[in-house]
C-alpha cells in the first residue's frame, strides 16, 4: 500500500495538518477541488498590483467591486477579486439542501480562507465545554501556525485571557477606531469591573509585505480582496509547500468515499472532467469543511438517514453610534477589516464569552443606509452620520446558539445532505441583555446601540460551524477520538471543525488550524 498521507482540502484545516505531517518527514498528497480565480481577473490583479494606489485612475478597481452588495443584514455573498469562484460547484460536489440555514462550502484553492475576515483568536479554556483537549494542549500548535501564517497583532489587555502565542505588529487603526480606543482606554478600569476587555484586532495579514508586494498601503479595498495579496489565504502556503519534495498537490478532485483496511485507505474521487479515480495511501485526513466533510463521512460510513448535529457560534450585526464625530475618517489611509476586539464576560448575561469585532467606515456601509432612507438620502447628513457609525460583528457560544440537524439521504444513484436548523429561545434573550448592557456602558464607551438596525444572521451565516463528529475521550456513535477518528475507524482522521465538541465565540479558524496541526503532529510522529 502507498505510504502517502492523503490530506483532503486546501483550506485552513487541510493545510495546517499537511504542514505538521511534512514537519514529521511524512509524504503528503493533497487532494483538492482547487478552483482558482479566472485568468481574466487574475491578469487584472497582476497589473493592478504592479502600481501604487496613487497611480490608479478612475475605475481601475471597479472590476473588483462588481457583484459585491451590502444590506442591513450584511453581505449576502462575499466575493473575492470580483469572483465567486470559491463557491462554484464541480463534478462530484455534494448536494446540500438547507431548511432555515444559510451557509456554504468551498471547493476553491484555499477554501473559505479566500473570503474570510482574517480575524484570529484562540479559544479560552473557560469556554471549551466538553473538550477532551485543553487550551494548553493546543498552545504549541497555535505557536507553530505563526511560522507560516503571518498575523498582525500586539500584546495588550486581551493577552490576559487570549494569548498571542508569538510576536507581531498590529495593523494601523482608522481615525474612528483610534478615537474609540482612546475612550475605552481612559475607562479601562471601570470596563474591566463590568466584565469588558478590549484590545487591537489580530488579523492574518502580511502587513509588512515579507516576500510579497507590500507593505500594506491602506487602500481600503480589504473587503473586495487585497490588490497586493497581503490577506492570508492557505492557498499561499500550498504554493510554498509545492517546493517540498515530499508534498504533491492534486487539484481537480472531489472525494466521494473513503474506505480503510488494515493496510491503508482507498479514496474514490471524481475529477473535474467527471472521470472516476481511485487513489491509495496509508492514512486519510479529512479537512474539506464541515458541510462537505459531514456528507463525505456519512457516505463513507454508509450512514444514510442517520442524523448528526451541527453546532455553531451564532452571528449577529449591531450598528452603534458614537456621539462625538471624527474628522477625516473617510476613505484613504485605512484598512477595512476588524479594528478592535471587545470581549464581554458577564455571567448575568451568559456564562461564556461574547466576542465583538469593531468595524469602522468602508464604502459598503453607504448602500444599505441609502436604501433604508429612500428619497431622504439626498438630504441626509452623510459625513456627520458615517463619522459616528461603528459596525459591531458579534458571536456567541454554541451552547446558546441555534443547532442544525444533518442527515444524508439517498437520491436516485446519488445522495443529498439535508439540513434543518432549530432556534433556541435563549439566543434572543441573551442578545437583548447584551444590548441593554452596552447601552448602560455608554458613559464608559461613548457608544449607543442602534437597536432597530440590529440583525441576527440565519443559522450557519457566520461560518463558525462544526461538531458533527465531536471529539471525545471515549467516542461512541458519531463521536471521534482525540485524533479525529470517528468511532470504529483507525486510518481516517477528520481534522476540520467537524470534530470540535463545542464552538466558543472567539473566532473559529485559528483553533481549527491548531487542532488540525496537533492531529497531524501526533499521527505523523507515530503517536497513534
Image: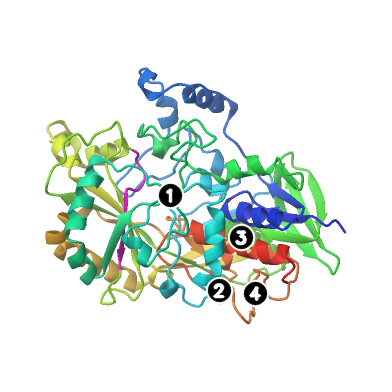
Mark nearer the N terminus (1 vs 4) = 1
Q: Is residue 318 left or right of residue 93?
A: left
Question: Looking at the image, is mark 2 or mark 1 nearer the viewer?
Answer: 1
Question: Looking at the image, is mark 2 or mark 4 nearer the viewer?
Answer: 2
Give the residue pinned by disc 1: 168
- Mark 2 touching mark 4, by CB under 8 A? no
> For the residues marked 2 and 4, what is the alpha-carbon distance in whole angstroms?
10 Å
Residue in the image at 61% along x and 64% along y = 518
Please identify the quadrant where the N terminus is shown: bottom right
Residue 481 is marked as 4
- Secondary element under disc 2, as helix, strand or loop, is loop
User: Is 519 above or below relative to 509?
Assistant: below
Mark nearer the N terminus (3 vs 1) = 1
Q: Position of residue 385 (x, y in %)?
A: 16, 41
Asked whether the viewer can see residue 282, the reply is: yes
Tell me where residue 184 sits by quadrant. bottom left
Q: Which residues are magenta?
A: 335-344
Give the residue pinned by disc 3: 517
> For the residues marked 4 and 3, what is the alpha-carbon distance in whole angstroms?
15 Å
Q: Is residue 51 left or right of residue 381?
A: right
Q: Position of residue 76 (x, y in %)?
A: 40, 45
> For the residues marked 3 and 1, what is the alpha-carbon distance in whole angstroms?
21 Å
Question: Looking at the image, is mark 4 or mark 3 nearer the viewer?
Answer: 3
> For the residues marked 2 and 1, what is the alpha-carbon distance in whole angstroms?
27 Å
- Mark 1 touching mark 4, by CB under 8 A? no
Give the residue pinned by disc 2: 133
- Secondary element under disc 3, as helix, strand or loop, is helix
- Mark 4 touching mark 3, by CB under 8 A? no
Mark nearer the N terminus (2 vs 4) = 2
Q: Nearer the viewer, residue 72 or 186?
A: 186
Residue in the image at 15% along x and 31% along y = 378
Q: Position of residue 133 (x, y in %)?
A: 55, 74
Amino acid at each position: 500500500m502507498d505510504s502517502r498521507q492523503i490530506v483532503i482540502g486546501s483550506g485552513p484545516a487541510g493545510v495546517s495538518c499537511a504542514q505538521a505531517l511534512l514537519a514529521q518527514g511524512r509524504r503528503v498528497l493533497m487532494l483538492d477541488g482547487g478552483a482558482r480565480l479566472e485568468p481574466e481577473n487574475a491578469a487584472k490583479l497582476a497589473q493592478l498590483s504592479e502600481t501604487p494606489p496613487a497611480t490608479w485612475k478612475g475605475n481601475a478597481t471597479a472590476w473588483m467591486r462588481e457583484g459585491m452588495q451590502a444590506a442591513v443584514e450584511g453581505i449576502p455573498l462575499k466575493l473575492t477579486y470580483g469572483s465567486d469562484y470559491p463557491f462554484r460547484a464541480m463534478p462530484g460536489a455534494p448536494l446540500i439542501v438547507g431548511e432555515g440555514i444559510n451557509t456554504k462550502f468551498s471547493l476553491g484553492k484555499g477554501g473559505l480562507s479566500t473570503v474570510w475576515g482574517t480575524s484570529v483568536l484562540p479559544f479560552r479554556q473557560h469556554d471549551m465545554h466538553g473538550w477532551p483537549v485543553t487550551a494548553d494542549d493546543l498552545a504549541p500548535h497555535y505557536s507553530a501556525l505563526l511560522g507560516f501564517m503571518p498575523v498582525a497583532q500586539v500584546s495588550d489587555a486581551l493577552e490576559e485571557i487570549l494569548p498571542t502565542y508569538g510576536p507581531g505588529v498590529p495593523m494601523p487603526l482608522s481615525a474612528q477606531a483610534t478615537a474609540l480606543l482612546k475612550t475605552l482606554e481612559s475607562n479601562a478600569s471601570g470596563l474591566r469591573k463590568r466584565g469588558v476587555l478590549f484590545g487591537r484586532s489580530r488579523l492574518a495579514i502580511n502587513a509588512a509585505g515579507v516576500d510579497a508586494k507590500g507593505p500594506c498601503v491602506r487602500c481600503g479595498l480589504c473587503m473586495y480582496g487585497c490588490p497586493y495579496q497581503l490577506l492570508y489565504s492557505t492557498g499561499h502556503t500550498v504554493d510554498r509547500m509545492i517546493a517540498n519534495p515530499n508534498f504533491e498537490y492534486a487539484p481537480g478532485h472531489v472525494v466521494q468515499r473513503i474506505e480503510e483496511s488494515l493496510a491503508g485507505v482507498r479514496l474514490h474521487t471524481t475529477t473535474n472532467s467527471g472521470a472516476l479515480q481511485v487513489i491509495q495511501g496509508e492514512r486519510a485526513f479529512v479537512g474539506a469543511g464541515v458541510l462537505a466533510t459531514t456528507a463525505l463521512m456519512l457516505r463513507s460510513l454508509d450512514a444514510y438517514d442517520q442524523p448528526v448535529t451541527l453546532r455553531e457560534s451564532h452571528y449577529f450585526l449591531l450598528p452603534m453610534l458614537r456621539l462625538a464625530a471624527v474628522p477625516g475618517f473617510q476613505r484613504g489611509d485605512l484598512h477595512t477589516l476588524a479594528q478592535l476586539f471587545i470581549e464581554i464576560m458577564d455571567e448575568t448575561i451568559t456564562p461564556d464569552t461574547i466576542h465583538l469585532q469593531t468595524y469602522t467606515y468602508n464604502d459598503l456601509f453607504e448602500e444599505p443606509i441609502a436604501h433604508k432612507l429612500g428619497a431622504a438620502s439626498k438630504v441626509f447628513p452623510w459625513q456627520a452620520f458615517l463619522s459616528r457609525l461603528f459596525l459591531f460583528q458579534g458571536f456567541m457560544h454554541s451552547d446558546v446558539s441555534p443547532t442544525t440537524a444533518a442527515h444524508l439521504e439517498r437520491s436516485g444513484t446519488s445522495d443529498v445532505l439535508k439540513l434543518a436548523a432549530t432556534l433556541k429561545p435563549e439566543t434572543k434573550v441573551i442578545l437583548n441583555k447584551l444590548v441593554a448592557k452596552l447601552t448602560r456602558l455608554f458613559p464608559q464607551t461613548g457608544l449607543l446601540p442602534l437597536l432597530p438596525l440590529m440583525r441576527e444572521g440565519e443559522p450557519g451565516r457566520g461560518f463558525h460551524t462544526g461538531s458533527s463528529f465531536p471529539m471525545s475521550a471515549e467516542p461512541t456513535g458519531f463521536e471521534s477520538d482525540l485524533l479525529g477518528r470517528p468511532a470504529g475507524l483507525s486510518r481516517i482522521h477528520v481534522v476540520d471543525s467537524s470534530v470540535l465538541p463545542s464552538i466558543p465565540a472567539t473566532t473559529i479558524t485559528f483553533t481549527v488550524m491548531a487542532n488540525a496541526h496537533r492531529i497531524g503532529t501526533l499521527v505523523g510522529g507515530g503517536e497513534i
